Image: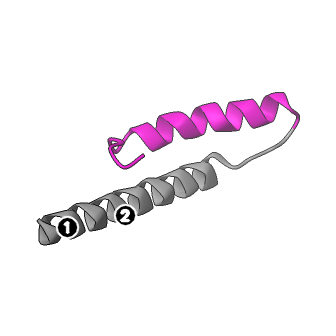
Amino acid sequence: MSTAVEHRPAEVSRLWVAERAADGEVFDPEIAVWILSGLADLARARSSHYRRQALQQS
């Protein structure tokens, strides 16, 4: 997720919502995008943090 491009969370959320719908669940697509975008942002932040730490230790 840390390397996901901006449009990828929207694509994945459509698949996620469709999968839940196949199981009879209703899931708001906007919430799915919000969750996955937040998760991607978190992954990017952690990845960036670890890269900075590695550079400082070198």
Query: Residue 52's mark?
Result: 1
Q: Does the magenta stretch include residue 12?
A: yes
Residue drawn 29% across and 64% down? 50
Q: Residue at x 59, y 52 (%)?
A: 30
Q: Name the residue under label 2.
A: 46
Task: Check if residue 3 falls in the magenta segment.
Answer: yes
Task: Looking at this view, name the residue that lies furthest to the top.
Answer: 22
For the residue labelled by badge 1, is the local secondary structure a helix, a strand or a loop?
helix
**Magenta span of residues:** 1-24
Q: Nearer the viewer, residue 39 or 17?
A: 39
Residue 45: quarter of image = bottom left
Residue 55 in the figure: left or right of residue 3? left
Residue type at mark 1 is Arg
Could you classify mark 1 by the number of other residues whose Cα lies within 10 Å: few (under 14), some (14-19), or many (20 or more)? few
Q: Which residue does the image show at 37% across and 64% down from the upper left?
A: 46
In x, y percent, where is residue 11? Answer: 49, 34
